[in-house]
Amino acid sequence: MRTLALLFLAALMMGLSSCGGNEQKENKATEATQAVENAAEKTKEAATKAAEEVKEAANEVKEAASEAANEVKEAAQAATGKDGKTLFESNGCVACHKVDQKSIGPSLKEIAAAYQGKEQELIDFLKGKHEAIVDPAQFAVMQPNLEITKKMADEDVKAIADYILSVK
Ligand code: HEC
């Protein structure tokens, strides 16, 4: 009877200890899973951060490039005189057209107001293909100047038109 009780006790203890072992194993497995999950989370965060940094850097490069492109464009315009204002001044138009007051010809403000939203018509006028709309009675005074603008490259005429229309 004593031996039986001892055996029972031993069996019980084995059972208990093996049970505890399982629990430990399970705990370890949970810990490991959590560690893997944590690591994955950290990797994800790091990757997102890195991606954001790359994106920011790319934006900075893009901005710097477009700034540089603009500077090159401005420099090119200054060098070739393709800027409308420069063309307007270098071709003697300023002699009769002031920015905001009438002199021999109407002011640029007045011309710009008449041609607002009609850039193509302004270009056509300068190419001798459209009649005067601002002060037709004085057209004879303006007419000889069309010989200058008619000979200009399309982009130069457009530059002058852009400049006139930019005057507010
Ligand atoms: C000798 C003076 C004189 C010069 C130089 C001159 N203009 Fe004029 N311009 C006039 C007069 C006057 C008018 C008003 C008559 C008219 O509306 O066509 C006029 C009108 C204009 C108009 C308005 C046209 C419209 O629809 O009525 C434009 C645009 C213009 N000039 C551009 C120029 C440009 C560009 C130059 C230089 C290439 C220039 N002008 C040089 C006297 C001049």
Image (spheres, rainbow, N blue to C red):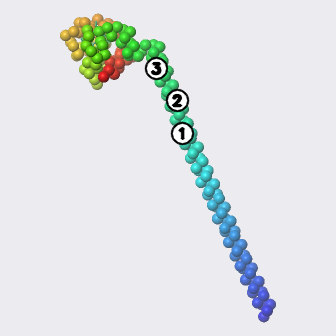
Residue type beneath disc 3: Glu
Q: Secondary structure at mark 1?
A: helix
**Is 120 or 133 nearer to us in this picture?**
133
Is residue 137 visible to us here? Answer: yes
- Name which of mark 1 and mark 3 comes first in the sequence: 1
Marks 1/2 in contact by CB < 8 Å: the verdict is no
Q: Secondary structure at mark 2?
A: helix
Q: Cβ(mark 2) to ligand 1 < 8 Å? A: no
What is the CA distance from the residue labelled 1 to the residue labelled 3?
Answer: 28 Å
The dot on residue 74 is 3
- Neighbour tally class for label 2: few under 14, some 14-19, many 20 plus, Cα within 10 Å: few
- Neighbour tally class for label 1: few under 14, some 14-19, many 20 plus, Cα within 10 Å: few
Marks 1/3 in contact by CB < 8 Å: the verdict is no
Q: Nearer the viewer, mark 1 or mark 2?
A: 2
Give the vertical position of 20 relative to 144 (above or below). Answer: below
Marks 3/2 in contact by CB < 8 Å: the verdict is no
From the top left corner, tell me how far across and down residue 58 is, in percent: 54, 35
- Name which of mark 1 and mark 2 comes first in the sequence: 1
From the top left corner, tell me how far across and down residue 154 is, in percent: 37, 15
- Name which of mark 3 and mark 2 comes first in the sequence: 2
- Neighbour tally class for label 3: few under 14, some 14-19, many 20 plus, Cα within 10 Å: some
Residue type beneath disc 1: Lys
Give the vertical position of 43 relative to 12 (above or below). Answer: above
Q: Ligand 1, what quadrant? A: top left
Residue type beneath disc 2: Ala
The part of the image, by quadrant, that contains residue 86 is: top left
List the residue tagged with mark 1: 55
Q: Furthest-right residue in view?
A: 3
